[in-house]
Image: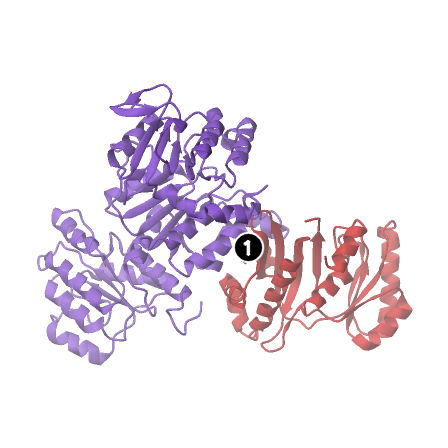
């Protein structure tokens, strides 16, 4: 029986248990171990040191691990347990889950591999597991890396902290088809101060799948953008269900998807006009377009867009104010903006007259507004305060190459102040000097996304515009 | 199950016959050229009085896949005499080139005015269900693969963006001495076709090829249709 065909009734009674996968009050690690470089060892260490709830250790081989009592079986624990994290070998998993159900546990994260992903024997084991779990306990996995919750320290990502950085709490939630990719993304995000508050990898999705995780994140008010890394769906009818859920969720908050595996099946598709399409990338793309999901071309692209979507208001139109201290960067950004359907409208003579009064004679005032190498913080502030509140533009792309002498860190504060105009702002900054890094930090800490190339900033504005159109914020514009 | 599809499956056929395909389209208000299934010359001569010249004549047979290859199609028939000759010639061609084919009859079909040739296709995918395709016809679809897809069911807006997504969309707005095309008529066909597919899960594959798009305001027609069916 397919997941989609599962009894809806049985599911409804335990749906709230999905929350226990992310926010358990108490957790038991089945297969806890002191062995440092093992999966169970890393999880034991992580949860004991960081998790804000109660942690029980279970493993018949030990009486205690690092001074913490270890139980022979989950049934020996006197207190109640919300969630189990299972790290025992595959053949032992069905029994362990059965015991957990007896204990009254409502949710299980099965990290253990060795199920349908390894072949027929594993698939049989997975079927057995499904029979035991169905309608009685919610299951994430098996064969997954599980959950990362930056808010309460619930973290089953079995990658040691010295190998994988953990991002700070923040408005981005990640759903990943791949555990390894999820780990790499979190590490990367941590390094760049991108707040990924919640992350999850669902492995073989015996029970909880991406559609349900989307629904769950849609309800969590801390999540402002949902990022998905997808390789492919596998169960019959799954696409239809995901389409319905995406359509619903996208009207509440933006979903950014990077779908890997895009090899073109279109050639075959066209040959018979229709056949040979099955599971092809074209279908995923069709689905994304249909439901207002924003598609990324790679992982950096994904987070470039997510950063803007998480922090910026939605624009009411496609007109961009570009302010730059480098003519060359200005031109690059126009090219990029154009490719996303955004325009850089020339400002009216009357507005330009006002600008000229306070800008140096060499400055270009048409838009892009080129303040040249003699730019100062005050000039940027003047242009922002003069143009951004008008109806001539819907958003701003600010290029600030901080290497010129007239600019100081204070420019960051001026840009942050311009948030009061309630229009999207993104900043292009390029360079590696400590001074530049400090400037970027002020912006990012205050909700202004910074990009290291004009095309990436343009892409971010393009995503805001695309989503604004989908949500109906933009009037009178057709695709 | 739709009776047309049910009947075909009952007879062990996995492809609808021409007139069945058109009949199915007609049930969903998808415009097709006027047509009739006739058994012989006399019936053809009688029916053509209602349809009016020019017409095309096609052999209808469950055993013939490529009708033109066996001389089973004659286009641009303009008079009773030509119609008589066409019936005769197709019979002769079939008895020579496909002697074992069962002939159900002839499809008499009104010739459609020329227009922009497009293709609407569909396939049933295990994961997504029915998926709809739109593209420009002929060489453009084969060489340039200039097509767009959506998952069934689609809305009117989906249909519109499907049409506008293809690179050849400019042809809809008129180019050089070619007139602007009836885009909304295609939107209508796409949405009706989407409904036809969602209500008939037994359709495994389908093509409307070509869909001829006339000048703006003058409509569009499915000039040919092919349905592959199967158990759901």
Label 1: which secondary element = loop
Which one is nearer the viewer's eye here, B185 or A292?
A292
Label 1, on which residue?
B145
Colour of chain B, in one word, is red
Residue A266 location, x and y as percent? 55, 50
Q: Residue at x 38, y 57 (%)?
A: A254
Please identify the quarter of the rendering in which residue A407 is found.
bottom left
Please identify the quarter of the rendering in which residue A57 is found.
top left
Horizontal side, residue A28 vs residue A260: left or right: left
Which quadrant of the figure contains the N terminus of chain A? top right
Residue A73 location, x and y as percent? 40, 25
Which one is nearer the viewer's eye here, A299 or A358?
A299
Residue at the bottom extreme, as displayed? A350
Residue B138 seen anywhere in this rendered image of the structure:
no
Residue A435 seen anywhere in this rendered image of the structure:
yes
Horizontal side, residue A279 vs residue A363: left or right: right
Q: How many marks?
A: 1
Residue at the top extreme, as displayed? A61
Chain name for mark 1: B
Please identify the quarter of the rendering in which residue A164 is found.
top left
Check the image and report above or below for A135 versus B203: above
Check the image and report above or below for B5 versus A149: below
Residue A60 location, x and y as percent? 38, 20
Which quadrant of the figure contains the C terminus of chain A? bottom left
Q: How is the image coloured?
A: by chain
Residue B67 location, x and y as percent? 77, 56
Q: Dot 1, crowdedness within 10 Å: few (<14), some or many (≥20)?
A: many
Residue at the front extreme, as displayed? A78
Which one is nearer the viewer's eye here, A63 or B91?
A63
Q: Residue at x 39, y 28 (%)?
A: A74
Colour of chain A, in one word, is purple
């Amino acid at each position: 029986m397919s997941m989609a065909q599962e009894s809806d009734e049985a599911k409804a009674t335990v749906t709230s248990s999905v929350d226990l996968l992310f926010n358990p009050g108490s957790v038991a690690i089945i297969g806890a171990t002191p062995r440092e470089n093992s999966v169970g060892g890393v999880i034991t260490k992580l949860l004991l040191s960081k998790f804000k709830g109660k942690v029980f250790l279970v493993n018949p081989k030990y009486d205690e691990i690092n001074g913490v009592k270890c139980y022979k079986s989950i049934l020996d624990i006197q207190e109640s347990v919300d969630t189990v994290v299972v790290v025992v070998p595959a053949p032992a998993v069905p029994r362990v889950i059965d015991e957990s159900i007896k204990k009254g546990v409502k949710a299980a994260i099965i990290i253990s591999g060795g199920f349908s992903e390894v072949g027929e024997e594993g698939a049989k084991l997975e079927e057995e597991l499904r029979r035991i779990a169905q309608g009685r306990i919610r299951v994430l996995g098996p064969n997954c890396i599980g959950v990362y919750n930056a808010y309460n320290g619930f973290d089953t990502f079995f990658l040691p902290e010295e190998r994988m950085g953990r991002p700070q709490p923040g408005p981005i939630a990640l759903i990943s088809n791949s555990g390894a990719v999820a780990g790499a993304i979190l590490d990367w995000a941590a390094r760049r101060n991108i707040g990924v508050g919640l992350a999850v990898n669902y492995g073989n999705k015996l029970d909880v799948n991406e559609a349900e995780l989307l629904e769950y994140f849609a309800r969590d008010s801390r999540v402002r953008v949902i990022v998905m890394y997808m390789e492919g769906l596998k169960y019959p009818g799954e696409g239809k269900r995901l389409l319905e859920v995406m359509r619903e969720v996208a009207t509440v908050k933006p979903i950014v998807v990077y779908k890997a595996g895009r090899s073109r099946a279109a050639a075959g598709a066209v040959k018979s006009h229709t056949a040979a399409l099955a599971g092809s990338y074209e279908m995923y793309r069709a689905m994304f377009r249909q439901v207002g999901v924003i598609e990324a071309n790679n992982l950096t692209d994904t987070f470039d867009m997510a950063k803007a979507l998480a922090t910026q208001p939605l624009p009411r139109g496609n007109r961009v104010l570009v302010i730059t201290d480098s003519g060359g960067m200005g031109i690059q950004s126009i090219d990029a903006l154009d490719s996303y359907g955004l325009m850089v409208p020339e400002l009216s003579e009357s507005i330009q007259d006002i600008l000229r009064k306070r800008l140096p004679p060499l400055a270009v005032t048409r838009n892009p507004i080129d303040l040249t190498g003699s730019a100062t913080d005050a000039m940027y502030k003047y242009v922002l305060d003069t143009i951004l509140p008008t109806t001539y533009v819907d958003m701003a792309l600010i290029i600030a190459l901080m290497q010129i002498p007239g600019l100081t860190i204070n420019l960051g504060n001026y840009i942050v102040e311009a948030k009061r105009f309630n229009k999207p702002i993104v900043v292009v900054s390029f360079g590696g000097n400590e001074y530049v890094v400090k400037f970027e930090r002020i912006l990012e800490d205050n909700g202004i996304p910074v990009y290291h190339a004009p095309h990436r900033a343009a892409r971010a504005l393009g995503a805001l515009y695309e989503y604004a159109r989908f949500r109906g914020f933009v009037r009178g514009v057709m695709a | 199950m739709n009776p047309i599809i049910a009947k075909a499956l009952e007879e062990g056929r996995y492809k609808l016959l021409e007139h069945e395909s058109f009949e199915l389209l007609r049930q969903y208000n998808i415009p097709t050229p006027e047509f009739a299934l006739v058994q012989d010359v006399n019936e053809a001569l009688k029916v053509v009085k209602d349809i009016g010249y020019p017409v095309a004549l096609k052999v209808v047979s469950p055993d013939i896949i490529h009708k033109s290859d066996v001389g089973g199609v004659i286009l641009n028939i303009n008079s009773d005499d030509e119609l008589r000759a066409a019936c005769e010639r197709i019979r002769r061609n079939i008895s020579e080139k496909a002697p074992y084919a069962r002939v159900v009859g002839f499809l008499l079909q009104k010739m459609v005015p020329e227009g922009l040739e497009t293709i609407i296709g569909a396939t049933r995918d295990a994961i997504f269900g029915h998926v709809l395709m739109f593209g420009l016809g002929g060489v453009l679809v084969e060489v340039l693969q200039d097509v767009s897809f959506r998952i069934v069911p689609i809305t009117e807006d989906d249909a519109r963006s499907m049409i506008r997504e293809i690179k050849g969309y400019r042809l809809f707005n008129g180019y050089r001495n070619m007139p602007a095309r009836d885009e909304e008529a295609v939107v209508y066909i796409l949405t009706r076709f989407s409904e036809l597919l969602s209500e008939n899960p037994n359709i495994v594959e389908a093509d409307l090829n070509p869909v001829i798009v006339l000048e703006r305001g003058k409509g569009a027609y499915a000039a040919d249709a092919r349905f592959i069916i199967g158990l759901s």
